[in-house]
Amino acid sequence: MSLSMYQASVPVFIRGLTVLAALLEKGAAHAAATGSDPAALVNARLAPDMYPLSGQVQRASDAAKFAAQRLAQVEAPKFPDDETTFEQLQKRVADTIAYLRSVPADKLDGAEGRKVTLSFGEFKPQFQGDAYLLTFALPNFYFHVTTAYDILRHAGVPIGKLDFLGPYPA
């Protein structure tokens, strides 16, 4: 049996976002348990030129929803990138998951052969759908999920590799 573009994208993004939501829960719990300012954690970053935790969550959300939009040709919701609390970040993740769950699997039929052109300033790569998913969308998504994990871990949140991997499906 072949692996479909749907199987390789939407459920993978949902699983990663579910893990991200669990990491955010642990971050909020850590701030509460230690009496630290949750806003400081939401604004924490690994380096001055990198997005803070909030930006990493926003970019992971965007990577997932825009990949689905580009591949399924189903309009994604627009979010204003104004989250400043753990609760708002959790809502963003939940709203992204809800959108992904609304994408019909059959809309990704044939997506491996669709032309995808990105436009980020002067960076305008073109991909075939399968190459876009496997060499750009998924790596970009996991970069931001991983960086969110790294920020939380660096800030002392007690998380480890199994938290990043999340629960295994039965």
Image (cartoon, rainbow, N blue to C red):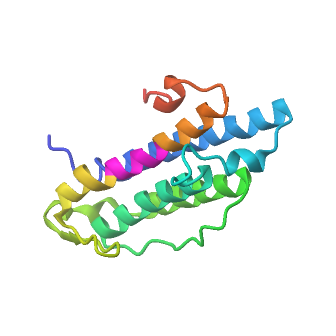
Identified at 53% across, 52% down, the residue is 56
Q: In this orientation, which residue lies closer to the viewer: 54 or 4?
A: 54
- Up-down: is 149 above or below 107? above
Q: In this orientation, which residue lies closer to the viewer: 78 or 108?
A: 78
The stretch of residues the image draws in magenta is 138-145
**What's the magenta bit mostly, secondary-structure-wise?**
helix
Task: Answer left or right for 17 relative to 24.
Answer: left
Q: Is residue 30 magenta?
A: no
Q: Toward which corner of the image does residue 66 lie, by quadrant?
A: bottom left
Give the image location of residue 107, x and y in percent: 29, 66
Q: In this orientation, which residue lies closer to the viewer: 99 or 61?
A: 61
Q: In the orientation shown, which residue stands out farthest toward the front?
A: 48
Task: Answer left or right for 159 relative to 168.
Answer: right
Identified at 32% across, 55% down, the residue is 137
Give the image location of residue 169, x and y in percent: 43, 30
Q: Quadrant of the N terminus?
A: top left
Task: Answer left or right for 29 relative to 55.
Answer: right
Task: Answer left or right for 104 relative to 155.
Answer: left
Give the image location of residue 18, x and y in percent: 53, 43
Give the image location of residue 12, x and y in percent: 38, 45
Q: In the orientation shown, which residue stands out farthest toward the right?
A: 35
Q: Is residue 143 magenta?
A: yes
Identified at 74% across, 47% down, the residue is 40
- Up-down: is 37 above or below 115? above
Q: Toward which corner of the image does residue 3 lie, by quadrant?
A: top left
Q: Quadrant of the C terminus?
A: top left
Identified at 54% across, 28% down, the residue is 163
Number of labelled discs?
Answer: 0
